[in-house]
Image: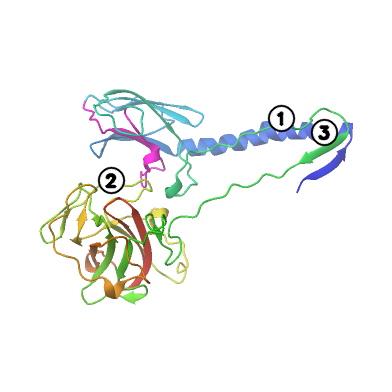
């Protein structure tokens, strides 16, 4: 609510002096402290063929690079970070990414620039030049890792600030809203395809059902049903029995939400203290993805033929609610529980899957070992 007050000439001078003192000194100090703290914890690194080349570089580090390091210098201006690179062995898909913290977990595509200073890889290698990135917000969720916004002191231009007696209007600041993370409570699900155009949920079944013990087969299983089947990226590989023989790189092979293209589970052991969250193993909380050990049914990378692997098991006994999927091609993803290194107990499991059209689906469940 606006606060209307009559202010005489003399108190106005005092009020403006206090505003200038607070805004020009205290506010600036707070602002600079916030900014410096964020910058001191921000790094850039060079990625070539899916691997890091040279050491990550803290963006305020002005020391000369080591011989052979592709990142030669970094300069900061406000929220913009300009990186100068020189790497004769560069390939067309090389890029530079920026992240908060000393370890680059959950770096999102929007915090990446290819060497042509674009969001898409160039068709030919760029060996030397500059790219400009924005400092990520350390307080944002990994699903919304927006550029860091440093506060600024704004004096409104639509108010009469002349030194005279009159009515002055004060409006309290409105705090910014923060979007909730995906699957931040038990059994909250996200389905990128089912959320649009009235399509059915593609994540149709999970075994064991929520709150049930793992069966005698000692497996955790999840099914996708879609007209394009399920996703299995080209960067991974499976043998003729569906056993996965090579996994993808989750730091590189991931969707626009930051989830890996390869199907994954994120695990949190439940205790009386965290049974209602937060779940530290969840993707949004920095959890580590554990990829499926085997696949069955109709899986493929988008636009590619389906793999020649065994047919999927019948998901009917494990259907979630009344979900029917979107299409008639089933894909089954399997995790061998005894290979997960878990001790007996209750576990929160966040499962991320994609269909063959690259749509993301997430389900959260609880299993008992």
Task: Give the CA distance from mark 1 to mark 3.
Answer: 21 Å
Q: Nearer the viewer, mark 1 or mark 3?
A: 1
Residue that label 1 marks:
157
Report if the CB atoms under discs 1 and 3 are less than 8 Å apart. no
Q: Residue at x 26, y 53 (%)?
A: 356
What x and y, as percent, mark residue 124? Answer: 24, 26
- Mark sitting earlier along the chain (3/2): 3
Whether residue 214 is visible: no
Please tell me whether mark 1 sits on a helix, a strand or a loop: loop
- Mark sitting earlier along the chain (1/2): 1
Q: Identify the image quadrant of the C terminus.
A: bottom left
Q: Report crowding for label 3: few under 14, some 14 to 19, many 20 or more residues within 10 A (C-alpha).
A: few
Describe residue 209's horizontal placement relative to residue 329 as left or right. Answer: right
Residue that label 3 marks:
14
What x and y, as percent, mark residue 269? Answer: 37, 67
Describe residue 168's horizontal placement relative to residue 74 as left or right. Answer: right
Residue that label 2 marks:
253
Image colouring: rainbow
Report if the CB atoms under discs 3 and 2 are less than 8 Å apart. no
């Amino acid at each position: 609510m606006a606060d209307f007050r009559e202010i005489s000439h003399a108190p106005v001078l005092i009020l403006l002096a206090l505003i200038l003192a607070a805004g020009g000194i205290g506010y600036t100090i707070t602002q600079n402290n916030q900014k410096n703290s964020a910058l001191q914890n921000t790094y850039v690194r060079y990625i070539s063929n899916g691997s890091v080349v040279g050491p990550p570089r803290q963006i305020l580090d002005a020391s000369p690079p080591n011989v052979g390091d592709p990142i030669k210098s970094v300069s900061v201006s406000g929220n913009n970070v300009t990186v100068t690179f020189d790497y004769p062995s560069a390939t067309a898909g090389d890029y530079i990414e920026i992240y908060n913290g000393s370890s680059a977990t959950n770096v999102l595509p929007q915090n990446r620039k290819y060497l042509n200073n674009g969001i898409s890889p160039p068709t030919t290698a760029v060996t030397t030049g500059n790219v400009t990135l924005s400092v990520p917000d350390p307080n944002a969720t990994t699903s919304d890792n927006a550029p860091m916004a440093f506060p600024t002191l704004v004096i409104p231009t639509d108010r009469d600030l002349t030194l005279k007696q009159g009515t002055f209007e004060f409006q309290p600041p409105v705090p910014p809203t923060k979007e909730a993370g995906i699957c931040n409570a038990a059994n909250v699900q996200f389905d990128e395809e089912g959320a649009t155009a009235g399509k059915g949920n593609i994540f149709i079944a999970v075994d064991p059902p929520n709150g049930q013990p793992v069966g005698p087969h000692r497996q955790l299983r999840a099914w996708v049903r879609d007209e394009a089947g399920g996703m299995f990226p080209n960067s991974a590989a499976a043998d003729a029995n569906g056993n996965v023989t090579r996994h993808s790189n989750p730091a590189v092979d991931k969707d626009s939400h930051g989830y890996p293209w390869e199907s994954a589970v994120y695990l949190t052991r439940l205790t009386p203290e965290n049974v209602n969250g937060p779940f530290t193993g969840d993707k949004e909380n920095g959890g580590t993805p554990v990829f499926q050990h085997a696949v069955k049914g109709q899986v493929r990378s988008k636009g590619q033929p389906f793999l020649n692997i065994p047919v999927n098991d019948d998901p009917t006994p494990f259907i979630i609610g009344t979900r029917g999927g979107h299409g008639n091609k089933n894909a089954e993803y399997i995790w061998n529980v005894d290979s997960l290194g878990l001790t007996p107990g209750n576990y929160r499991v966040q499962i991320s899957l994609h269909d063959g059209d690259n749509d993301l689906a997430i389900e959260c469940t609880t299993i008992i070992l």
